Image (spheres, rainbow, N blue to C red):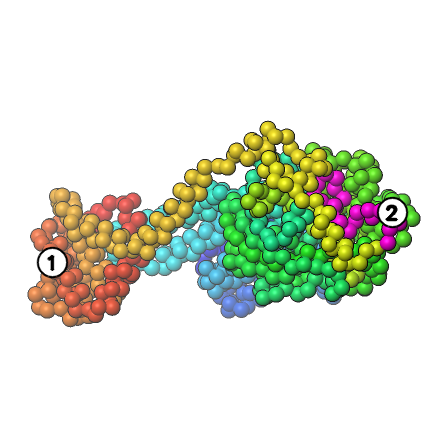
Amino acid sequence: MTTRMTLASAAATLLTAMALVPLTEEGTWYPKAVVAVAVLAGAGRLARLSSMPRPTVVAVQLVVSAALLSFLFAREQAVAWLLPGPEAVRRLGALLRQGVEDVGGYATPAPLTEGIALLLIGGVLLIALLVDALAVTYGLTAPAGLPLLALYSVAAGLADEGGAGAFAFGAAAAGYLAMLLADGRERLTRWGRTFGGGPASSARTGQRTGRRIGVAALGVALLAPAAMPSLGGSLVAGLGSGGGTGGGGRGPASSVDLLLTLQDNLNQTDDRTALTVRSTSDRTHDMYLRITSLDEFDGATWKASPRRTIPLPDRFPGPPGLDPQVRRTEVTSRMSAADWYGQKHLPMPYPAAWAEADGDWRLDPVGLTVAGDGDASTRGESWEVASLEVRPTREQLASAPPPGPELRNFTELPASLPEEVAATARQVTEGSRNAYEQAVALQDWFAVTGNFTYDTQVDVGTGSDAIVRFLDRRTGFCVHFSFAMASMARSLGIPARVAVGFAPGSEQGDGSVEVSLRDAHAWPELYFEGVGWTRFEPTPSRGTVPDYTLPETTPGATAQPEEEAAEEDELTAPRPQPSSSASCTAERQRLGACPDQEETAVAAGDDGSGWPGALLWTAVAVAAVLLPLSPILWRRRVRASRLETPLRGEADVLPHTLRVWRELTDTAWDLGIPPDDSLTPRRAAERIVRAGQLDAATAEAVHRVATAVERVLYAPRARAAPGLAADVRKACAALRASMSRSTRFRATFAPRSAARIRQGLSTRTWRPRRA
């Protein structure tokens, strides 16, 4: 391989590595990586010029990589600044461990610590070595794309939303495409002029066409997703791919992203219906649809712990901590998502007992959430869920024993969280006798007595002081309230997490429930031994307050038996009536959280025409029909062009003769006689006659065509030979008749000569001339 291929492989690595630049606050590591990759590529080039064995070339590059890392990160400990002695190895090992810890501890963009810089530059060097070894040393250019894909995948997986976007993908794809083109040019230069009926310039033309095809494919890959209809920046769409329980999506969204996307959804003027629910429950006014839960808190960010998922079982594991004596009712709900609502998690009530959905869906057996794997999405789909309506009594919650050690991680708080949060929690819950009374006191303080106001227009804020600012200003929306209450509950030793999904939707006259974007919600879940994870509602004017947190009807009254309490609850539970406003439940009307009628009318009237989707699916259907037929249609068109195009004069003798000859050889190829460009036309004709077992008259026609080809290629003056198209038709018919039915079927529906499509495109760019 020449210097061109070495440069192309190095450039491909560096272009792909550009996707890593947004991961850090400073990009000063990238110029160092450029120099290091250049030195590595140069070392490999020199080793190959010295005719070293291939494994030795790779070994030399490994030594050079180690020397480069020692020079950049352990210069003082290395021997002669380059050789990695024991001290340098210990230094690099310590930086490596620091880098791993920093990656886990910082959100992107992270500060450029020495450890992170070592991971970035060392990783780029490793990928560069692999690409150079595969593409240049061993000549395996196509597999060299796998290390590049791994490098880009790491960048895309770690970056924030939009961090590794179209530019990064385009740069990586362009690098790989340049490497493939360089390899193709290398291979062409090792072959002389091949017999194909074209001038020497056809090789250069093929290269130009290859570049055009590559650029076109790259443009389609970049622009096609932008043309596809999608929800865009929805809160639940962003969370759907995170959380560590999905099917290989991005990591959990940061708290800042979560606040901003939820705030955008709550402020939308177009309140579209995302879900329609039909349930056997008679308490749909209290049905929260949970998407995922956030259980890791570092002071600034709540995120979901990564967990192992399993295929959907027939029945889910029982919810953690729920004892048999706690009253529950199993209900079944069928949910349908709008065509525009694409979500990687199934919204469903908690706790779910089983779920059925089309596609590849997997269960997180700990959080009892269902996430899609691969292309699985809720877009336009329906699914069925059985869930438990758990109705604990106040006494069961108040008498819950302390949580076990397995829940210790749900009470952890970072050292960066200001002390004011815990101090406020102690002040609010002063006089409470148990964890349940503390939880109710926190909920009531946020929702009623603390003079908090609900406002989606506030500045979300960032950092570990965001909760303190919210407690001081006392205005915010559901994410502020849920984050603050969960943090304060943890400071009191109560296991807590934050659930994200939808508040109860709007009941319709036909018994269904419509859930819209403005119902997107976040709420805290607190754990009580014997009851399990229990919902609370601290956000004023949103959702419904759980029955088990409401005060007793008569102060000082004794507790009722569970059966009597259940009957009374059924009789006294508020029954929302169908509202004239399709976006407001009776409970929300009672809380004064309904939009005005004019705004509701505007939102309800915008249902969209749907014609872009119809056009898209029509195009897909047409493509599905035409794609299998495309080889047949192309072959017929080419055959007609070659045999039916008349001879237009002396200047057209050469192209016409070569066209009919190509039709003969392509027909033979379709019928299982592959072309051999190393043969002269006369020898190729003999091979066709022999393989097709043609009779004497047909063989004579084949040889007439071959003789005409030799004359127009090598005679001083090209002369037309009459009847060539007729001879080719006769020969092709005889060839088909001599073959089996299966061979003729394959030649018709899957012609082997369809491989010449790219060559057929390239011939449009040049006009053959006499040799």
Q: Image point 48% across, 48% down: which residue?
A: 174
**For mark 2, what is the residue?**
555
User: Looking at the image, can residue 18 be seen?
Assistant: no
User: Mark 1 belongs to which amino acid?
Assistant: Asp
Q: Nearer the viewer, residue 535 or 399?
A: 399
Magenta residues, as a range?
Answer: 537-558
> In screen coordinates, is 535 left or right of 417?
left
Residue 737 at x, y = what percent? 16, 66
Q: Image point 73% across, 54% down: which residue?
A: 567
**For mark 1, what is the residue?**
727
Which one is closest to the eye, mark 2 or mark 1?
2
Neighbourhood count class around disc 1 (C-alpha, 10 Å): few under 14, some 14–19, many 20 upward:
many
User: Mark 2 belongs to which amino acid?
Assistant: Pro
Q: State the CA–CA distance, disc 2 to disc 1.
A: 107 Å
Extreme residue in the top direction: 598
Q: Image point 26% across, 55% down: which residue?
A: 632
Q: Image point 48% across, 64% down: which residue?
A: 138
Extreme residue in the right direction: 431
Do the residues under discs 2 and 1 have CB atoms within 8 angstroms?
no
Residue 603 at x, y = what percent? 56, 34
Residue 544 falls within the magenta-colored stretch? yes
